[in-house]
Image (cartoon, rainbow, N blue to C red):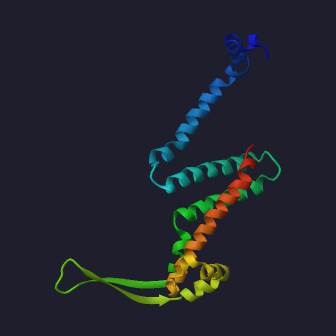
Amino acid sequence: MSKEYNEWYWKLYRWFKWEAKHVHRDIAQGFKNLWKWFPIVWKDRDFDDHFIFEALKFKLKNTADYFEVKQRFVGWEDEVRYIRICEKLIERIQNDYYQSEYFDYYDFNIEWIPVEGNDDLVEFKEQEIRNDVADYIAKYPNTHKKVLNNPKYKGYKKATGLALAMGIERHLKARKLLFKILEEKIESWWD
């Protein structure tokens, strides 16, 4: 383009000719977005990864809902499936699902007993009610093998500690899977 067509009046002319007729729709969509995102923005805080995941989960949900309604391209079902998987992974990561899953196999009571002669100290006493952690460990043999071979988890010898280490490892695996799906698929999530 020559210099003369880059002057402000030509830019203004092109804007009126091509974009001004859509301004009312852009403004309406902007207000809809403000209304839709208001609860997310209102609750947002800058000190935790939970809020980053919350915004990402909300955006993924909106995108999947949009694809389901519009159905504008071949293979939209697969893309929606991947987006919903990402939503579920984010939910599980936020709620520490994998790290606390072994508690479905282990029940216990906790008592705090005051130490005689010192009112400032208490003794921790744990009473095991049910211990089916071996079933949990048997349920995920690959994770069990990975934890046993990882020097990071050397101190986890008891079954409950091993189950906790397995939960940590499964949590990390879920996070890696989430970002791998995003890395490979996010650029195809457009309409």
Is residue 152 or residue 49 the one in the foreground?
Answer: 152
Residue 26 image offset from top left, x and y in percent? 63, 29
Residue 142 image offset from top left, x and y in percent? 67, 80
Residue 31 image offset from top left, x and y in percent? 56, 33
- Is 172 left or right of 66, judged from the image as shown? left
- Is 132 left or right of 16, judged from the image as shown? left
Residue 24 image offset from top left, x and y in percent? 63, 25
In this view, the residue farthest toward the front is 151
129 shown above or below 19 = below
Is residue 121 or residue 127 the one in the foreground?
Answer: 121
In this view, the residue farthest toward the right is 74
Residue drawn at point x = 57 percent, y = 65 percent: 92
Is residue 124 or residue 22 the one in the foreground?
Answer: 124
Q: Quadrant of residue 29?
A: top right
Residue drawn at point x = 54 percent, y = 86 percent: 133
Q: Looking at the rendering, in which quadrant would you find the C terminus?
A: top right
Q: Looking at the rendering, in which quadrant would you find the N terminus?
A: top right
Is residue 140 or residue 7 the one in the foreground?
Answer: 7
144 shown above or below 168 = below
Residue drawn at point x = 73 percent, y = 48 percent: 187
- Is 38 left or right of 135, judged from the image as shown? left
Q: Quadrant of residue 11?
A: top right
